[in-house]
Amino acid sequence: MEFLNKAERDYVKSHVERIAAKIRAARKAQNITQEKLAELTGASVSMVKSIEGSQRAPSLPMLFKILYVLDRQAKIW
């Protein structure tokens, strides 16, 4: 993904990191492994690890799948 400037890149990065932290915290709070989350969402384990590690942002459909598994009422977002 290309950015117009550093401010835009930093803005996106901070939000990706925030989402990653919320996903990781919700998964751990429910004692779900990364492997199980991958299975429940149809993602690969490496994708889940990349999302939680802030190396990649989840696509919108993947984010909704994760929300469905971890927080169906979307209270933590």
Image (spheres, helix red, strand yellow):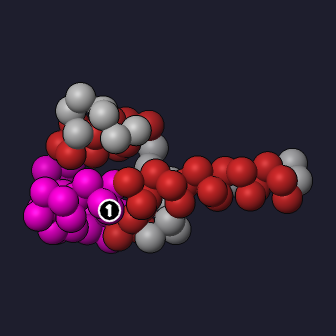
* Location of residue 61 with respect to 8 vertically, above or below: above
* Location of residue 33 with respect to 70 vertically, above or below: below
Q: Residue furthest top?
A: 73
The answer to whether any part of residue 69 appears in the image is yes
Of residue 34 and residue 29, the one placed in the foreground of this image is 29
The answer to whether any part of residue 65 appears in the image is no
Residue 72 location (% of width, % of height): 21, 32
* Location of residue 63 with respect to 43 vertically, above or below: above
Q: Which residues are magenta?
A: 23-48
31 within the magenta span? yes
Picture residue at 34% right of the left edge, 55% below the top = 23
Q: Quadrant of residue 52?
A: bottom left
Asked if residue 43 lies left or right of residue 14, the reply is left
Asked if residue 76 lies left or right of residue 6, the reply is left
Picture residue at 32% right of the left edge, 62% below the top = 24
Q: Disc 1 marks which residue?
A: 24
Badge 1 crowding class, 10 Å Cα cut-off, few under 14, some 14 to 19, many 20 or more, is many
Q: Of the residues shown, which amino acid type is indicated by label 1?
A: Arg
Quadrant for the N terminus, please: bottom right
